[in-house]
Amino acid sequence: MNKIEPSFRPGGKFAKLESVYDGMETFLFTPNTTSRLGAHIHDGNDLKRTMITVVVALLPALLFGMYNIGYQHYLAIGQAHTGWFTMFLFGLLAMLPIIVVSYGVGLGIEFISAQIHHKEIQEGFLVTGILIPLIVPINTPLWMTAVATAFAVIFAKEVFGGTGMNIFNVALITRAFLFFAYPSRMSGDEAFVKVDSAFGLGDGTLADTFTGATPLGQVATNVGDSLQMTDILGKPISCMDAFIGFIPGSPGETSMIAILIGAAILLLTGIASWRIMCSVFVGGLGMAALAHALPSATYPASMLDPMTQLCLGGFAFGAVFMATDPVTGARTNVGQYIYGLLIGVFAILIRVYNSGYPEGMMLAILLMNAFAPLIDHCVVSSNIKRRARRAAAKE
Amino acid sequence: MLSKKNKEAFFNPLSKDNPVLVQILGICSALAVTASLEPAIVMGISVIAVLAFSNVIISFLRKTVPTNIRIIVQLVVVAALVIIVQQILIAYNYDVSKKLSVFIGLIITNCILMGRLEAFAMHNSPWPSFLDGVGNGLGYTIVLLIVAFFRELLGSGSLFGFQVIPQWCYDHGYMDNGLMILPPMALITVGCIIWVHRARNKELQEN
């Protein structure tokens, strides 16, 4: 690495690729330059380690997601007794292209952008790149994922100034872009269960009773006074199934257990804000309880009991991994409570009372992303006012 | 007839002083009518016509109108012209006029018009005012057409209503981008055009 360094410095053969070299060097080795003057925070916890911790926290959800894709697939083709390793392998093969595309496109744009501006390459995409495959339905065509990722990285991140400057969560913008641009591929029967084979693995014909709708999708189209969610073969499912995660859905969001393990890692290492995380759940629980207290057949989701409501769909995943994004969320302590509470309330509000959107978490977080700076501003200025009053009273 | 000043009045608004890209005027209608090319071009021609003739009329009146009621006089002139354009459209191109719905009527409130009347026609003689009106109208139309080109191509796979993206693309999984039809994408497209425009004209970049 050191041998080839000079050719990347200004004047060298590959001077144009300086940022790429820098990025690789700091990624592979600890930089041997440290600050010499002035007071600095002495903590080894830099952006890179923070990002890696979040990726580690995402692993349970990722691994379970892969297994679940395989499980749903073999269930759909009527071979539910296939070994768990085959199921996992199927899910791995199904998700691998999406992960490769997401990282390839996103990092490609980051590298080019850093090179144009002669800046260091930022690590921000490490997390976004793994979040995208987790929240995009498994059957989304790869080119759509590529277009959406490119759009999100350019228009939600680079134009605002790159890592740390974005207003909206980049992974959610990818999802929102797909949702609004290609609505027919983002919902309904064909989006969430992979029924064709992955690289030749898992051939088979569909069971007759197959229906690929997610529980929330079924809820949204439910007619009548009673509500019964079913799995993809038409057998009824309970809150427990949703808690463990054997339901159709985007890869990362189905298993509450896997998400809670991730949440524990994030909270123990102090990376995510527990204020945001808790208040999202409290807000969601409160709103779901309110909706459940006034059930109506017009809004079928109001018949779900609050706990089931939180276990279904992307609520938990959004609360743990998306709402707590330190860049786009609120930063003041009081602001974080308000921010999280409103995300929870809006997510359930959209879910229950807007039949156009069976899942409201994405829109709720994006909405509150836009309001986070305003919340912080109000908290700070009210704090200043209070202290000014206190100072005036003392004199 | 075509002195340097008149040439500037006509050519500057096309790029260097473009009403949409540089002065950021008339954005509302640029977002609303650009989902496909046909309404965009009709809208563009309507704005050129209204802008050119209202500029000329106001320029003739500029010495007789008392300053304190000039805005009302300008509005009356513009409104009269807009109604003429609207009636012509309803008579000869009913389908497009339905597509454009209120936006022809809303030319009255288009900031480009009031801007040009106030800034140019009130201080200049009719001929330069006419050139200025046509130039600004053209500048507006060019932007409208670029935006509509991309929105119709990517959003509906067609241009002027004719299918341009071949069927085999759709057979192989290509899909039209529904977001391009929605207004937010028009705003982003305008943003991209401004981006390219400023990148090419360095003197326009603010610090």
Image (cartoon, coloured by chain):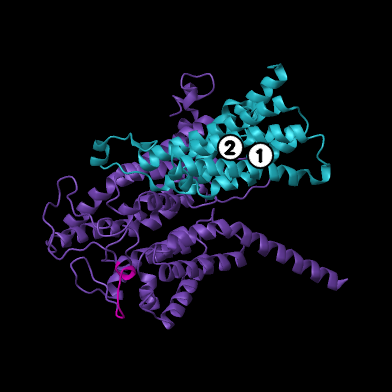
Identify the secondary structure beneath mark 2.
Answer: helix
Under tag 1, what secondary structure? helix
Instruction: Give the residue drawn at x 49%, y 35%.
Output: B41
For chain A, what colour was chosen?
Answer: purple
Position of the N terminus of chain B, as image quadrant, is top right
User: B116 or A115: which is nearer to us?
Assistant: B116
Q: Looking at this view, is B36 or A190 the one in front?
A: B36
The magenta span reads A218-226
Residue that badge 1 annotates? B113
Crowding around mark 1 (Cα neighbors within 10 Å: few <14, some 14 to 19, many 20+) is many
Point out residue A213 in the picture as x, y percentages from the top left corner: 26, 63
- Report the amino acid beneath label 2: Val
Q: Which mark is residue B47?
A: 2
Looking at this view, name the residue that lies furthest to the right: A395
- As drawn, A121 above or below A328: above
In this view, A338 is above or below B90? below
Q: Chain of mark 1?
A: B
Disc 1 with disc 2 on a shared chain: yes
In the rendered image, what is the letter of the chain coloured cyan? B
